[in-house]
Amino acid sequence: MRVTTSKSTAPEVAKDASMLKQKEMMAAHYDRLSNANENGQKVASTFVPGNLNELIMCFDLVNNLPEVNAIQSGLRRQSGAYVMEAERNGHSEDVCTYVKSDLGMMAKGNIGPNGKRLPDPDVLLLSYTGCFTFMKWFELLREQYKCETIMMQTPYMADGKITKNMIEYMVKQLKEDVIPKLEKVSGVKFDIDRLREYLRNSAKAEDDLVYVLQAAKNKPSPIDAYFGGIYYIGPIFGAFRGTKDAVDYYRFLRQEVEARVAAGLGPVTPEGEMGEEKYRLVVEGPPNYTNFRQFWKMFYDEGAVVVASSYTKVGGTYDFGFRHDPDRPLETLAEYCLGVYTNRSLPMRVDMLANYVEEYQADGLLINSIKSCNSFSAGQLLIMREVEKRTGKPAAFVETDLVDPRYFSAANVKNRLESYFQMVDQKRSSGTSGVAA
Amino acid sequence: MRTFIGIDLGSTTTKALLLDENQDVLGRGITNSRSNYDTACRVASQEARIDARFTLFRRELEATDGLNEKTNAFLAALERYFRLEQFLEQLDDLESVCISQVEGERFAKIETGVKQALGEVFARLRDEAQDMFGPDATRKSDFFRDIAGSRYLSIAEEVARDADLAYDLLLNVYDKSIITVENRPPSGGMSAKFRNALERIQAENPDFAGAFLSHIERALDVELEETYLVGTGYGRVTLPFSKEHIRSEILCHGLGAHMMFPKTRTVLDIGGQDTKGIQVDPKGIVENFQMNDRCAAGCGRYLGYIADEMNMGLHELGPLAMSSDKPARINSTCTVFAGAELRDRLALGEKREDILAGLHRAIILRAMSIISRSGGIADEFTFTGGVAKNEAAVRELKKLVKENYGDVTINIDPDSIYTGALGGAEFARRAVDVEGEGVAA
């Protein structure tokens, strides 16, 4: 089922029913957040990779995700002004633009995407330290809010595996630091059975999410696993994992995708059903949010569909088999934090992307490198070459930013993308006939 | 005959190239892109078709009499007179547009005087034209605006003084008119201009033209059928081309470089607005590429900006930089800061040639970084784009290639500015011939 919504200013935007449902969920989340003080609820700010939503819910805390706020500001074209505001307050041009958008938003009154003021956090919970900027960001927030700050150290998967030691180290932190502090802030006693219940919900939703993402192995792919994927990961990477809502949403989404597969349909784009699937791509790196639609259009106009992406794994690499396990509640949280995409070493990222190219029968790898992300842009050219070498498929590189509109040059990006698609064409025809055209 | 056209709509210039069925270049044409790609496209294509006629004349003469001193002299005369005919036609156009501008309050009472003065200016321009296109004359530029503009301004100054009119008035009329004339699609009737040119030759030397007349007529009778056209470059999307007639400039440059030098494996193109490092396989298929991102630092436009700042012509930069033996060390190739950097160094007493040499090196350093990100330099290496014509840039490139990659064959084609258009034309040819044979393109 597809529903078309219309706004007075923008042309009609086609959305799947699941996308509309997702939008409603996000709106409900923001309302809950902005009404938290009124309702006597306390707020925890945390990050997407390695977020401990199930644990946070055990303390009746409302989950606030500054990254998601920055994304929302980007999509709503407000991040540009926020970034400039942060720069006026002394943050340099090279600082992560999620951070600057967030700080700028606070400086300008902390108005959320629903037009209401977002509450100050009662606790800052950093449960993933793979991005060094996150720590600095939370230091700045601690300075601002003077509230309890928890920094849980997550060991980096440098050798490509999770060891017993790593899990023990994290469980120890959970027991001795994280849980006691959350109890103190919230005044709610920790109940492990409550956590188990949430984890059970998580695992159900995770099963359905994996089905949805892997449905892209079909030809044509029923989904776009990058641009469309952003919608799909919204609830589970944020404040909904572990909830009944998330279970329902992913079941609903799965049914929708199953129907598309059965009907042999491709993805739905903002302009309706996508035409013929001409290129299947694997994408590394986050999308650009300030020109999200324009960026997407550059793909679907050319018949390019993304069949797998690493970005949809930053909040969990469920397709490799991990599920939250209610029988090992604390250990499973540790494993979750350790396993997210951003905590994976360069060789692991190469393996993952090269395998995606093969498994999803992609035409190649495209990297969208983020200007202001020093942590994850480093090494991307090496990743590209290595994946190219292993798969024999052409790769390409474009550069944009998360939420700084100044870093998006449409002509330049389009030029590179078109060149890439034509390169794929050329390769194909030379491979089959020996005549380049 | 069937022809295949490639058009490269660059940020600074628009290039067109005509290819025949044997992949031989028939003609090339170039014009300012202005801000009007539509006109630029038509002008460049027209120029390429004119050039193609000369190729046909040459082929015709070669096949019968063989090319010798006499035929070459004849072809040179034909070209001069043809250009003269074209120039006179545009001059007439300019005159009538200028006269039509003489109206309204400003010109009350002096209308007749201004029109007379314009008549005088254009009469003198016409008289001069014969010499401007004489056998030994050299022209700084082939663009109408450049040739006509500078002469108009100095003649108008004299005429205004003699007629006791404000010079501004004539200047203003010209400024308002030149863009209209420049942006007017070139008129057709090429054959008529060739015939007029032949008449001029005949009048000058009756025996000369007579002997060649039938050959020229035969070549003029060849119809240049526009079989397929491919557009590339930044302006490609603004043109009325449908999607199948558009190719990315990366692919066109890769293929064009391959056609010029079949052993090419790495291509560097420094154009007006971007710098591209391209890796191609032995068939000219692009394997990888990198280009500058949101910033045009170190591109051709940077040199243009420096030239303006130094009050020099773009083509004068290279030779001056070549005279330096102690290049300044410059790290920034930011176009925005270029003026400040330049003035700062001049104020410190550094020599112009040393600063320029340093700037050329800085550009090439940036290009080297882009190439290395695309996969480095493999033998053979082909350098294309407008900057490839700059000897100082080439000197720095050769040094840095040698330092970083050892002995590599570096190719630079004198027509390298047409690389993208050549690739486009070949794509056009393949679109018809290869697809026609049932092979997917």
Image: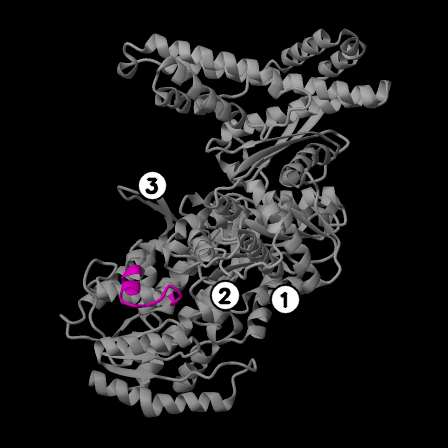
Q: Please, is residue B60 above or below residue B436 in the view?
A: above
- Where residue A150 appears, as percent x and y from the top left, is 31, 83
Residue placed farthest to the left in the image?
A: A38
List x then y, in percent, for residue A61. Answer: 24, 77
Which sits in the foreground, B2 or A53? Answer: B2
The amino acid at mark 3 is: Pro
Kindly identify which numbered label has been placed on residue A11. 3
Pick the front one: A302 or B304: B304
Q: Nearer the viewer, residue B26 or A39?
A: B26
Tell me the number on the disc at residue A57: none
Colouring scheme applied when the structure was drawn = one colour
**Host chain of mark 2:** A
Residue at mark 3: chain: A
* Front-lying residue, A210 or B6: B6
Secondary element at image label 2: loop
Q: Gap between marks 2 and 3, in whole Å?
A: 31 Å
The label shown at residue A386 is 1
Distance, label 2 to label 1, CA atoms, is: 16 Å
Give left or right: position of A191 versus A345.
left
